[in-house]
Image (spheres, grey):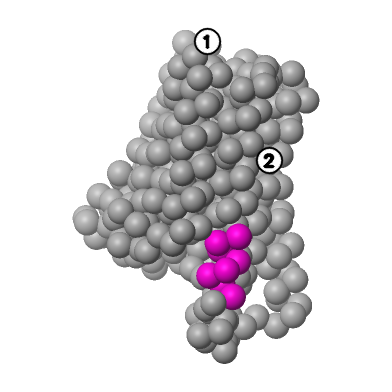
Amino acid sequence: MSGSGGVPPAPTEARTALAAGISCYLIWGFAPLAFQQMGAVGADPLEVMAHRAIWGVVWAGLLVLMAHQSGQVRAILSDRRTLGWLALSTALIAVNWTIFVLAVTSGRLLDASLGYYLNPLLSMAAGAWFFSERLDRWGLTAIALAAVGVVLQALALGHLPWISLVLALSFAAYGVIRKRVSADAQAGLFVECLLLAPLGLGWAIWLQVQGTGHFTDSAASVFWLMAAGPITVLPLALFAWAARRMPLSTMGFLQFMAPSIAFIIGTIQGEPLGDLRVVSFAFIWVGALVYAAGAVRRTRAARVLAPEPGLIDPPAERP
């Protein structure tokens, strides 16, 4: 793997990595439209979640086979400690995925967008809290701006933006857990889907037996619910491949593509956006820009200290 030895990628590989990174964030950005189609055929968030688990394990398994990581999967399954950590991360990502689908199928896409704007800032705070990572003035400023944005959002809504906070907190906690687990992204994701698959399959079968499932209602419902698998897994594979070959500063900018696309979609679909809520998002956007500027600064400083630019390991997966 080109990123393992600290050797910069060739120009062609760097362009391919950038294309893969952009592609994964475009898929994540437009994924709400697919989940809305699943809702349109009648599936509620729990049924969608069941099919994400069922078809996700199929696609994740194919990627594990293609990456020749079957041995790593067997090692994970035989290690109780690693399996325990992944069971906890599975619970967190299940909450994250379910709340995300609930948000995008119930006209709360702006709330989901806010959650994923907050995510990198919360992850940075979690790194400082759990891993003694140093927060510079850029990071502290970004977190402070985001905090003001959340307070203004609460004032605009009349209550805490619980969907945004649950999405951001669950994924930040997920990232902390996955950082402690010595498993590649694809193998870890396969095990997580494997742990979820029995529950998902059981729930889907129960719905069908009760006559309240929607998988066999029409060709459209079959297509969209099966699409939950590649929509879940493929962008993660692109992300994991690109992140090992891409500078941190580039990733810092790209990761705001998905919530920006979601914000635009939510606005076009007519979700309410009053003046105070616009101001709250403005604080979040400025915090995101400060975060990205800090990432650029850190990357440039690292290049001065190390003539050969290091490549980052991929952060934890997202929905």
- Locate residue 240: give its quadrant: bottom right
Q: Nearer the viewer, residue 2 or 231?
A: 2
Residue topped by disc 1: 211
Residue depicted at x 78% and y 25%: 268
Classify mark 1: helix, strand or loop. loop
Residue depicted at x 47% and y 10%: 210
Q: Which residues are magenta?
A: 293-300
Q: Nearer the viewer, residue 63 or 237?
A: 237
Residue 222 to residue 116: above or below: above
Nearer the camera: disc 1 or disc 2: 2
Considering the image in quadrants, where does the C terminus appear? top right
The dominant secondary structure in magenta is: helix
Residue topped by disc 2: 260
- The answer to whether residue 35 is seen in the rendering is no
Residue 89 is left or right of residue 60, and the answer is left
The amino acid type found where label 2 is placed reads Ser
Rendering coords of residue 285 (x, y %): 62, 42
Rendering coords of residue 148 (x, y %): 49, 35
**CA–CA distance between discs 1 and 2?**
38 Å
State yes or no: residue 97 in magenta: no
Lower position in the chain sequence, tag 1 or tag 2: 1
Rendering coords of residue 179 (x, y %): 37, 59
Residue 132 is left or right of residue 240, and the answer is left
Mark number for residue 19? none
